[in-house]
Amino acid sequence: MLVVDGLTCRFGSKAAVDDASFSVERGSFVGVIGRSGAGKSTLLRMLNRLAEPSQGRILFEGVDVTALQGRELRQWRARSAMIFQQFNLIGRLDVLTNVLMGRLSEVPSWRSLAQMWPEQDRALAISALDQFDMASYAAQRADQLSGGQQQRVAIARALVQQPDIVLADEPIASLDPRNTKIVMDALLRINKHFGITVLCNLHSLDLARGYCDRLIGMASGRVVFDGAPAALTDQIARELYDLEADEVLGAAPHVPHGVPAPALAGVAVA
């Protein structure tokens, strides 16, 4: 279980996240929603320790994540894989190498620098790409892919980290509707077929209601809603999103009941 206890992050006098507290059960798909500037990205970055909390604690299975340093912190960042809005791929490198970067915490640095990846890691990366219909692009430069394809590569990179949690920070913000569905289905597949906990920042309320088991609503850095999607009424949503309410309220997308996926050889889910 992930426990967030009184988590706060201040930049000067402004609290980007203010006294956030909640817990997340293993295997959940949680949507973090709210208007732009609500603190969603800062919250996820603190969970991965890319942003440092000003106060409060993050606990995972009894371990105080906020106290980790050095190798233990690097291991936590591998266990809590980040997926970013802008993909964070190395454009000049091929797709396979980008996915293999997810194994950096498990191989000696000289192997990665010399591009001498262990065969089992290469097989794992190809298998992850195959999950998202990207194996045929393994030798292609990452900067030659579409945005949706790049995000699927980024998800494959996260998967080969063999994480306990995937933290997706607005993963579909720059994508068209077709690629939005492809990427959200990919995250749902990770969650349902491998039992990996997913926390996903989403601006779209319709997507959050369609894909997530639970919603955490943020406003001005504070958690103001925490519950099932069905409990988030349009009235609450309008209070949560304020002037952006009309933008985020609309028809929910169709989400399939089951997302078929072949087994990913070598990926062990704790």
Image (spheres, rainbow, N blue to C red):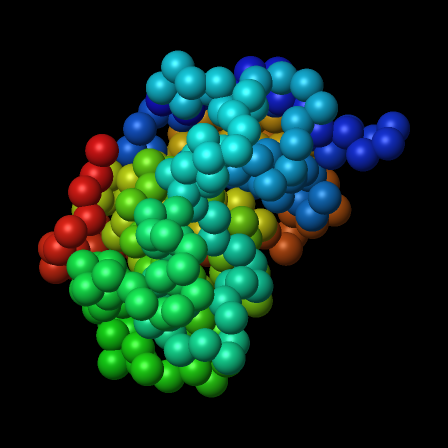
Is residue 34 among the parts visible in the rendering? no
Residue sticking out furthest to the right? 13
Quadrant assignment, res 14: top right
**Residue at position x 19%, y 48% in the image:** 267
Residue found 20% across the figure and 55% down from its top: 259
> Which residue appears at 44% of the width and 65% of the height?
113
**Quadrant where the C terminus lies?**
top left
Q: Give the vertical position of 224 relative to 133 (above or below).
A: above
Q: Nearer the viewer, residue 117 or 258?
A: 117
Residue 266 visible = yes
Seen as rendered, the residue at the extreme front is: 110
Give the quadrant of the N terminus.
top left
User: Quadrant of the rendered structure where residue 181 is?
Assistant: bottom left
Lateral position of residue 194 relative to residue 244, left or right: left
Q: Position of residue 49 (x, y in %)?
A: 57, 35
Question: Residue 241: horizontal and vertical position, in percent?
Answer: 66, 41
Would you place residue 246 above or below residue 269 in this image?
Answer: below
Where is residue 77? Give x, y as percent.
46, 40
